[in-house]
Amino acid sequence: MRRWARLGNGFWCGFAIVLTAGITVRMRPADAPARTTTGGTGPGLVRIDAGLRALLPGGTRPRFADLDRDGVLDIVVAHRDRVRAYRGDGDRFVPMRPPLPPLASGSVFVADIDDDAHPDVLVAGEDGIRGARRHPSGRRWHPVGPLAGGAALRDATPIDGGIVALGRDGAVTRVRLPVDRPTVDTLGRVPGAARTIAADVDRDGRPDVVVAGRGIAAWLNRGDGRLVADAGLPFASHATDAAALPHARGVDVVAVGPRLGLVRCRRAPDGAWRMIARRTTPYLAVAAADIDGDGTLDVVAARRTGIDVFGDGRVARKPTRAVRVRALDAPRIAIGDIDRDGRDEALVTDRRGAIALRAPTR
Ligand SMILES: [Ca+2]
Ligand SMILES: [Ca+2]
Ligand SMILES: [Ca+2]
Ligand SMILES: [Ca+2]
């Protein structure tokens, strides 16, 4: 905890102890703004890959969440063989005790699916949604699933009293809870769908379902259990990732793809979707995060050889921060304020490893 508190104080030097029986990672400040580069109109980003790189070998899809509710973010990692959880104790991540029950790899998300105020771990993978519910005592996990009929899934997101799942075949289904008596209904089909998120796109205070693929498809949450298909917005090419971008006047959707570039889309009160900004840079992954800690969400986007930050989500302007990286292969971005300094850190993973980045201290 004390070491994390010093995160902002200049140089970094990390070392990692890796035990094959269970990875233990210890982090110390110091090391490496050396490869940080400046891009766009502002300063770059500082790498803090220290221990996280050892924790996250290639192919991982991490999520930050405070699983044990001690105020310190923990991390759930989908390794190739199974999903594991690591507890953050302030200056390192250690294997969580008890460990998660065996869970095959897939797209990880964290949600309280049994309404006991304790976060549960879910994985959308080859045989539907499986997961583990944390017992309030913290002493055991209860296996969950398979939910969603056991179909092969690409992604899933929690939404009001349920989960929306994206099949490999493009089917969009909703799993209604409770978890011991789930029901599944089909919302529709979105060919090429890559990512589903919850976002209040019609600004009525209820999260809606957004699917990004060859366009934005949306289902509006009427608040009475119904999810009603919305007009959406077609793209000329595929999105590979998307993020909700809440701002002062509503919630936009930011989507990226190698041919699509980066688009910011908004649903007008009349129901029409519009692309309000676009860049042609071939981005592959995107996330919303308050990297500079000013209380406004920024857009973090990963392209093959770099990671760019658009301050306040102004994607039509030059990146306000940028860092060059070695070629990324199918990157994903996880966001969390892991050092608890009020500014989000971005963890970019790909098939070969992980890079954690934060804004430099002013
Ligand atoms: Ca925790
Ligand atoms: Ca729970
Ligand atoms: Ca910000
Ligand atoms: Ca931080």
Image (cartoon, helix red, strand yellow):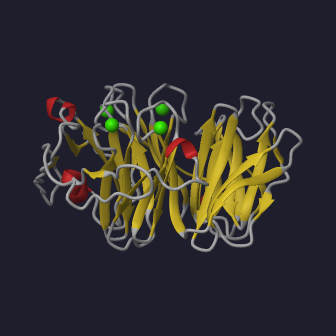
Give residue 40's position: percent from left, percent from top. Answer: 44, 57
Q: In the image shown, does 72 or 159 lie closer to the viewer?
A: 72
Residue 91 falls left or right of residue 282: left
Q: Position of residue 337 (x, y in %)?
A: 36, 37
Name the side, left or right, on which 185 lies relative to 85. Answer: right
- Taking the image as drawn, is residue 182 in sight? no
Is 293 situated above or below 58?
Answer: above
Q: Quadrant of residue 213?
A: bottom right
* Screen quadrant of the N terminus: top left
Number of labels in the image equals: 0
Residue 280 located left or right of residue 37: right
Give the residue at the far front of this rendering: 41
Q: Quadrant of the C terminus?
A: top left
- Quadrant housing residue 214: bottom right
Camera-nearest residue between 270 and 25: 270
Question: What residue lies at 82% left-to-right and 43% top-to-bottom?
Answer: 268
Relative horizontal placement of residue 251, taking residue 157 as reference (left or right):
right
Give the residue at x 44% y 29%. 118
Residue at point 20%, 30% (across, down): 5
Can the viewer see residue 213 in this picture? yes
**x and y, in percent, of residue 47 in the image:** 26, 53
In the image, residue 86 lies at what x, y percent?
28, 45
Furthest residue in direction right, as rendered: 270
- In this view, the residue in front, 33 or 174, is 33
